[in-house]
Image: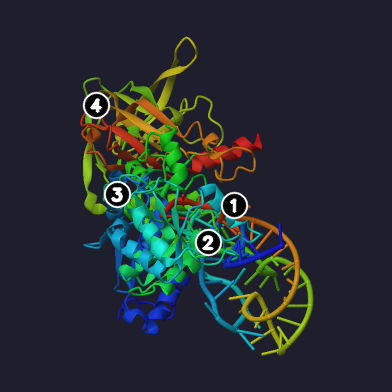
Amino acid sequence: MNDKDNNSPEEKESLDFIRTIIANDLKEGKNDGKVITRFPPEPNGFLHIGHAKAICLSFGVAHENNGITHLRFDDTNPTKEDTKYVDAIKNDVKWLGYDWDDRLHYASDYFSQLYDYAVQLIKIGKAYVCDLTPDQIREYRGTLTEPGKESPYRNRTVEENLDLFEKMKAGEFENGTKTIRAKIDMSSGNLNMRDPVIYRIMHASHHRTGDTWCIYPMYDFTHCLSDSIEKITHSLCDLDFEDHRPLYDWFLDELKTPCHPQQIEFARLNISYTILSKRRLRRLVEEDIVDGWDDCRMPTLSGMRRRGFTAETIRAFCARIGVAKRDSMVDLALLEYYLREDLNKSSNRVMAVLNPLKIVIENYPEDKEDILECINNPEDESAGSREVPFSRELYIERDDFMEDPPKKFFRLAPGREVRLRYAYFITCTDVIKDDSGEIVELRCTYDPETKGGNAPDGRRVKATMHWVSAKHAVDSEVRIFDTLFTKENPMDDSDGIEYVDAINPDSVKVLKNCKLEPSLADAVPGTRVQFERLGYFCADTVDSKPGQPVFNRTVTLRDTWAKIQKKQGKKK
RNA sequence: UGGGGCGUCGUCAAGCGGUAAGACACAAGCCUUUGGAGCUUGCAUUCGCAGGUUCGAAUCCUGCCGCCCCAGCCA
């Protein structure tokens, strides 16, 4: 079939356990040699990078085997779902780079088939109408160590069950007064098998079926049957559903269905300093702890996209972390590594000063101006170059000057000469302070012979700094992000601190007085650039306007100096 | 005390009876008009522990230990 990846015959790539299973199935000719997977989100929240792992897996494995993938909304609980989420989810999957073509499905499309399956189950004596209240059902279920006891309604006749089910459907009963339950085994060690509820009464309007139904099927009943109806071959889900597999198989074995898909479970993604749980992320949104699902600190695809992540980065990351069954916590640094690797190659360089300190080049004529040619991307020659103006008054980064520099600080200091990128060598001659002793301005001289950044006499300089011409500068707001949580594992509350109370107070800083080089004035929202020496930034898609750009810092550059500082701080 | 999983470097993760891949992180050095990028080198005598089988075990067997999930009319 596809023996395209024989580029290194000696090193046969190792497959993860799911791809191994599928490869074997194919070899044995199972499923007529087809691979059909599905991605089944419930439209009750936004997708996050944990979902991206599942999407890359299900879509990826199908694609690799000439198969297809369905996008199916698992919308069986109308009280929690909304079309705004289905739109967001579709958008995110598409953005990630996957295409379901015409295979867009909804579990709600199968409501009437599902109803028929339930009738079938009743008819073969494997399901019954139960009048127990939710509290009673819990009581009857038993505990992890003690068996449950059978419902007093368990042995109703098929006729009575059919009649009652019909009436449930017709809306004759109140919410919570009756359920349909599968008749399995109240003493099973697996609680899911203790007569699970498969239908409940919910007088609620559904985002797609409106008020057609007042009874809705439960996940366990719906999912396996939806998979079968769609002729899914491999149904991939997370480890939480491992205990549900016997039930998944039970329904498919008892009922006359088109096929019996194979459910395979894998470990969900965890990343340090973040939370990957739709339920918990929703709480951050609902309690206004963040500014919405697309807040740049959120691990949602929409938040990451707004912050400046590329789909390529996320796909590369998901490919690298692998698929296995053990619980793991991936280092945030790995995600950032792929981010930088991608952005380094694709982002144009530009100069911007986040925390400006004015300098005046005293021997540079007031009416003079230089237009300097700057390379857009040293990693990509085809990106070309641009012109940047230089003049007598400039802004440099406040951090790039120290009046009393420690060892290993190479940047500007009194009497020291450094290079301004693409411009000239300058030497600091004077430090001007205000009444409180704060440095407000630097006086410098430049060497006209060093235009472009090289000294004809061959003398060298330890540092190269970025700068922006004061009179040409574009004012901008820049947002600096850090991890949302202070704890490596925010889920770990063994210290008595819940994740909502472990929010990093410095997770966002808004810098209002930033100075950008003029080429950035009309940056198109969504544009990704590298601010030289600072990091990768993305023009905000919500707040950035032509003439008034707003940038989000996606990630810093690797910062050796920061590391040195940290070490020096530790020594002291 | 029930059922289901999982334990290989700081973090992910290969390995499937023949003598521990790779990546990130970390460290040292080279190079550099971004303290960026790039390059070089180092980094598990040992695979949760203890026995056993075998010429040979991370891989097979037995017994322990540890961690995760399950008691929604959520998915």
Mark closer to the observer (2, 1): 1
| In the image: residue A493, left or right of residue A503 | right
Asked if residue A469 is positioned above or below residue A108 in the image, the reply reads above
Q: Residues within 10 Å of mark 4 (few under 14, many from 20)?
A: some
Q: Earlier in the sequence, mark 3 or mark 4?
A: 3
Q: What is the spatial separation of the Cα atoms under label 3 and label 4, in whole angstroms?
A: 45 Å
For label 4, the SS is helix
Q: Which residue is mark 4?
A: A472
Q: Which residue is mark 2?
A: A192
Q: Earlier in the sequence, mark 1 or mark 3?
A: 3
Q: Earlier in the sequence, mark 4 or mark 2?
A: 2
Q: Position of residue A389 (x, y in %)?
A: 23, 31
Q: Chain of mark 3?
A: A
Q: Residues within 10 Å of mark 3 (few under 14, many from 20)?
A: some
Q: What is the spatial separation of the Cα atoms under label 1 and label 4, in whole angstroms?
A: 74 Å
Q: Earlier in the sequence, mark 1 or mark 4?
A: 1
For residue A478, what is the image quadrant? top left
Q: What is the spatial separation of the Cα atoms under label 2 and label 1, in whole angstroms?
A: 14 Å
